[in-house]
Image: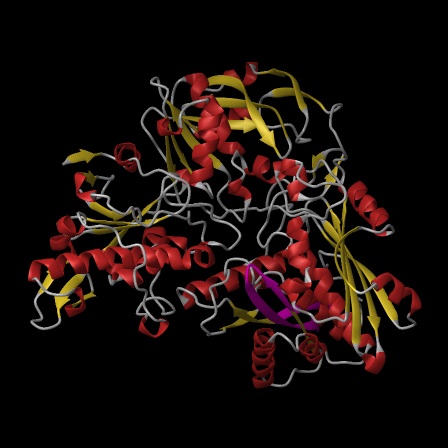
Amino acid sequence: MSVVNNRRDFLKISGLASAGLILGIPGLNAAQTIVKLDGVAAALELNPFVMISPSGQITLVNSRPDMGQGSYQAVPSIIAEELEVSLDKINIIPSDGNAQFGSQQSGGSSTVRGFWENLRKAGATAKEMLIQAAANKWKVSPADCYAEDGKVYNKNTRASFTYGELVTDASKLEVPTEPKLKEVSEFKILGKYAKRLDVPAKVTGEAVFGIDIVVPNMLYAVTIHAPSVQGKLVSFNDVKAKAVKGVKHVLTTDHSYPGGKTKAVAVVADNYWAALKASKLLEIVWDNSQITGSINSDQYFADMEAASKKPGVRAEETGDFDAMFAASENTLEGLYETPFLSHAAIEPVNATAHVKADGSVEVWAPIQGPDGALEETAAQLGIDKSKVKINPTLLGGSFGRKAFMNFMAEAIDLSKQVQAPVKVIWPREEDMAQGPFRPAMMSKMRGIIGRGNSLAAFSHQAIGESIQGQHWNGIQAFRADDWIAGELSMENHKYGFGVHHLSYSRVKTAIPILWWRSVYASNFAWGQECFIDEMAHKAGKDPLKARKELLRNSPRDIKVLDKLESMLASYPPLPTGHARGIAMFRSFSSMSASAVEVAKVDGEIKIVKVTSIIDCGLFVNPDMVKAQTEGNIVMGLTAAIKGGITFNDGKCDQTNFNTYEVMRLQEMPIVDIHIMENQEKPGGVGEPGLPPIAPALGNAIFNLTGVRLRRLPIDLTDVG
């Protein structure tokens, strides 16, 4: 047997790299290779996700970087359930971007819902091989054996072998292609509360985030970018910067933004503080004359308003809404707005790279997708992927930002230039002002009240820049943005309007945009769910009951609303001067309904309580579902009541948390969260709880004050 030092070498030897998720290769004699990873005993790999050493150490691979959503525990939990091992007896390592792990992109609330069955198969495959190995030793049928807590038992004699004692024989067996999976009623881990495995290390400071990385002979770099994002570098004076003790180099580096590239200036020093101090002494001349498009948020909103006066590109239609609207007397319409937003993760973007003399490169970074990082790094340097080693770290927040890895590309380029390991850290001001940002969007809403005061017809014209269009030029003029259309389709929201119309108007901007927590759902739930309330009030209906009528053909949604209604009914009656509003929204194959209670105190609106229901189907750990829903409430409220991102004269007006505020602890309302329990397919958890928050707040404010707000953010000190 040969011993290899890391998974990259293992893949080169075994030749397993291929597209898609591989659970095992029929006929593979895994005993030919032992895998030895940093801090992990020599282990035999039963499939890409499961490694067991003869000493009994069990190592499971988490293939989705953890940015706070809990994938560090969720992925191994799904495997461990079928493998029959407890979480306190496993070691967890991250995947490194190689193809056999399938998609390794954390985003779109896709980890559990996307890999639920395949990860279970990974655990079940290894378990069946271990059981077969034990059965062979005892010369009995596998049906006479069972696995429990890292051992295989003989049903007849109660004799047992540990997995470590069986792994060598098991690794020589053919890999099952269709292992038997457990019934939900048999689950011991999934759906049950379990302590977070990552919490102790985060509390003690042992957890390693990207910004914590230190490698021998490492230099530090701070990069300064054009204030107008697309601005071209003309010249820079570095005399004062180079006079700072510790500064080694002042260089230019390529800087990517959605849709293009420009140059940035980097200060490289032997410590971060020297690099940061020197960066502030640079005298840089930028040229903004070649910017394509407007970098002015007021102009962008004006352009969207102009677009709202024209028809959009039709995405979906049932009946002829425009004809019905023109012929109807009982109609209403409104224009709803959401601002640009920063991701504002606590850990600024950073990456460490070492381009070595032999042409290989090693990267340590808080990135959302090690597979994408591997591909991009190889392409950037023009080298084979086998020469790239990606070490994903924990992410101190991301919300979509760290899937756009321009900061990693800078570290790689600078390391190549200075021929040493380089850690790039963007100062908070660069991180916040450069973006990319959540797009600002508008929703032109129109509705028709029909016979019997029914909510008869509904039109949503989504207006604004397209992420697909700006990043990849992927939107044709005669087609709607696919992501937007998917969010707002009747197939997604399930509202059974007799006549329904959905359209999209693209309004371009040079302000760089990117997916943000819940992507477009955070924009368009605001218009959709406030307008449903507007229609209900105009029809003289209770908003919750009106939604139930529209959802009469979607019993799962009605159950969510029933639960919300029963929870609200269980609370004490609202005091005088208090009011509630509700909203619900489907996203990422889950549905969430929220109620927000508000009160007017000394002329100011106070958010008193938020009740959230989430139906995400089968889930891993209720504690993680609750934690993500709490985070969604905080982020949803922040997006609703704090100032957004604005651009004037090509520059971002916000540079740090003093000008881009987030909710503080003392502002946080009481929260009450309920998780629906059923056996539906797993849905997303990290994002679906966010979209209903802002519209529930807007509807509550209307119920309290009679003022219908259509523009975010809301100034709670100045509501009529």
Evaluate whether residue 383 shows in this view.
yes
Determine if the magenta segment contains residue 611. no
Determine if the magenta segment contains residue 596. yes
Q: Which of 565 and 111 is in front in this view?
A: 111
On the picture, is 679 further left or further right than 170?
A: right
Q: How many labels does the image show?
A: 0
The stretch in magenta equals 584-608
Question: Which residue occupies 80% across, 47% down?
Answer: 304
Question: Which residue occupies 11% across, 58% down?
Answer: 136
Q: Nearer the viewer, residue 284 or 580?
A: 580
Q: Which secondary structure class fits the magenta region best?
A: strand
Question: Which residue occupies 71% across, 35% down?
Answer: 510
Question: Which residue occupies 64% across, 56% down?
Answer: 486
On the picture, is 662 further left or further right than 62?
A: right
Name the quadrant containing residue 16. Answer: top left
Name the colouring of the figure.
Answer: secondary structure
**Residue 157 place in picture, x, y as percent:** 7, 71
User: Which quarter of the rendering shows the N terminus?
Assistant: top left
The image shows residue 8, relative to residue 233, as above or below, that is: below
The image shows residue 51, relative to residue 493, as above or below, that is: above
**Residue 321 place in picture, x, y as percent:** 83, 63
User: Which quarter of the rendering shows the C terminus?
Assistant: bottom right
Evaluate whether residue 602 shows in this view.
no
**Residue 484 place in picture, x, y as percent:** 67, 52
The image shows residue 540, relative to residue 302, as above or below, that is: below
**Residue 706 place in picture, x, y as percent:** 80, 72
Q: Nearer the viewer, residue 365 or 178?
A: 178
On the picture, is 391 further left or further right than 54?
A: right
Name the quadrant containing residue 371. Answer: top left
